[in-house]
Image (cartoon, helix red, strand yellow):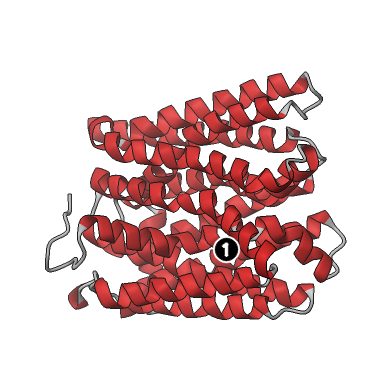
């Protein structure tokens, strides 16, 4: 188990968590702050189809999935901080492009660039944490970061709606630029480079292939990579359709950001709890608890919502999804840490590969959900059930293989 030392990490524990959470939150910020303004933006840019509006969300994930492939190997060669700076530059450039967009295609190009840039923070931050921590200690750090990170979906829709009402939807992109700049300045002034020069790996085809082969031949890495993509897929589908769920099905009006934020807070509460108990209970046990609970809750909701033609009363939807998201909150930090646990020697490449493949898989699931969206909650609920059952199967296979390896 690795521990950060004063020579490796300049920041105090709490400040380190806060900085890493801010850098990782740019992805969530780029998604959630836009949700209250989607309809107005679509009207201004002459977008007629609800399915096309979903692209404003999914195109960012596409940019992120592609970007993740490059940042990991790059950070293994030039260091973590320089790679994050590059990502922040692209994120700010994409925000500028979207800010001044006069048509939908330019908007999508800017959103793609935002995703390409935010991938740098998402991937390299995980590698930076892995430089300093491993095992349950990393899961603890990731859980605390996720607990703070989840404040973004809690607060971002309210912030986005406030900015939108005061200055219009374009001003939301200015807030992205401002926060990206703050994150970059904070990183530059306060955090030391975590990858020592003697541990850097040249970004040659041979070394990249070696890192990819190492990662893909490690059962825990590949298994939890697929598991993360499956679990995150329906959640991305929820994010893409949240505006339609709250505004079209339930017509909550301007209360949308508060209900959306409350559901996100449930994930944050679970992440903070996970950070406190993971050292004693263990990552694997918590993953099993979270998967069984989330899948069972989704099955229960499918049965109950079928009584209301899959558009149940808002109170039922809200209570069930609070419980569902709490169970999911036990998964995200643990699965990421489990995927990275045995590939620390190629942390940059491994983080990139795991992140890009899991993101592409989650995007495919989210796109499928949006394709079948029919003004009910049935497609989303079925997706949570199917991915939950499949993820349970994968995790059980990983656990069985680890037990056989110990016995052998």
Q: Is residue 31 visible?
A: yes
The picture places residue 365, in percent across and down from the top left corner, at 65, 47
- Label 1 sits on residue: 30
Q: How many marks?
A: 1
Answer left or right for 404 relative to 366. left
Answer left or right for 297 relative to 102. left
Disc 1 residue crowd, few under 14, some 14–19, many 20+, Cα 10 Å: many
Residue placed most toward the observer, 52 or 68: 52
The picture places residue 335, in percent across and down from the top left corner, at 40, 44
Q: Does 78 appear above or below 328?
A: below
- Disc 1 secondary structure class: helix
Query: Which quadrant is home to the C terminus?
Result: top left
The picture places residue 189, in percent across and down from the top left corner, at 27, 77
Residue placed most toward the observer, 32 or 366: 32
Answer left or right for 300 relative to 266. right
Q: Quadrant of residue 188?
A: bottom left
Residue placed most toward the observer, 83 or 154: 154
The picture places residue 27, in percent across and down from the top left corner, at 52, 61
Residue placed most toward the observer, 319 or 69: 319
Residue drawn at 63 percent across, 21 percent down: 300
Q: Does 224 appear above or below 197?
A: above
Q: Quadrant of residue 321?
A: top right
Residue drawn at 40 percent across, 34 percent down: 287
Q: Quadrant of residue 96?
A: bottom right
Q: Does 139 appear above or below 11?
A: above
Q: Is residue 205 visible?
A: no
Residue drawn at 73 percent across, 41 percent down: 252
Q: Does 168 appear above or below 273?
A: below
Residue at the far left: name it. 6
Residue drawn at 78 percent across, 38 percent down: 249
């Amino acid at each position: 188990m690795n521990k950060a030392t004063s020579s490796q990490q300049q920041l105090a524990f709490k400040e380190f968590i806060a900085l890493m959470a801010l850098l990782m939150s740019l992805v969530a910020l780029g998604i959630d702050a836009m949700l209250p303004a989607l309809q107005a933006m679509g009207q201004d840019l002459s977008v007629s189809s609800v399915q096309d509006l979903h692209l404003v969300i999914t195109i960012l994930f596409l940019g992120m999935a592609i970007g993740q492939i490059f940042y990991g190997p790059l950070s293994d060669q030039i260091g973590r901080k320089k790679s994050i700076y590059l990502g922040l530059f692209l994120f700010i450039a994409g925000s500028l492009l979207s800010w001044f967009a006069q048509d939908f295609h330019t908007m999508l190009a800017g959103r793609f660039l935002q995703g390409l840039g935010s991938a740098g923070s998402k991937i390299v931050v995980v590698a930076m944490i892995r430089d300093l921590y491993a095992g349950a200690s990393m899961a603890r750090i990731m859980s605390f970061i996720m607990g703070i990170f989840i404040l973004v979906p809690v607060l971002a829709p309210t912030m986005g709606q406030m900015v939108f009402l005061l200055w219009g939807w374009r001003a939301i992109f200015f807030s992205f630029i401002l926060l990206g700049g703050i994150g970059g300045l904070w990183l530059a002034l306060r955090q030391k480079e975590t990858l020592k020069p003697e541990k850097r790996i040249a970004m040659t085809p041979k070394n990249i292939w070696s890192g990819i082969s190492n990662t893909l031949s490690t059962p825990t890495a590949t298994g939890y990579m697929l598991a993360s993509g499956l679990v995150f897929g329906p959640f991305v589908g929820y994010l893409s359709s949240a505006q339609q769920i709250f505004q079209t099905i339930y017509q909550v009006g301007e209360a949308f950001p508060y209900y959306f934020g409350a559901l996100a807070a449930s994930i944050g509460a679970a992440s903070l709890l996970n950070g406190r108990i993971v050292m004693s209970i263990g990552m694997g046990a918590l993953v099993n608890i979270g998967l069984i609970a989330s899948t069972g809750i989704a099955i229960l909701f499918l049965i109950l919502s079928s009584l209301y033609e899959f558009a149940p009363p808002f109170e039922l939807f809200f209570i069930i999804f609070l419980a569902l998201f709490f169970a999911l909150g036990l998964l995200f930090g643990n699965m990421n840490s489990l995927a990275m646990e045995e590939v620390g020697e190629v942390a940059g490449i491994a983080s990139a590969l795991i992140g890009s493949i899991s993101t592409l898989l989650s995007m495919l699931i989210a796109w499928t959900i949006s394709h079948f969206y029919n003004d009910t909650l049935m497609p989303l609920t079925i997706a949570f059930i199917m991915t939950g059952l499949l993820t349970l199967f994968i995790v059980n296979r990983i656990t069985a293989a680890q037990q056989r390896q110990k016995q052998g």
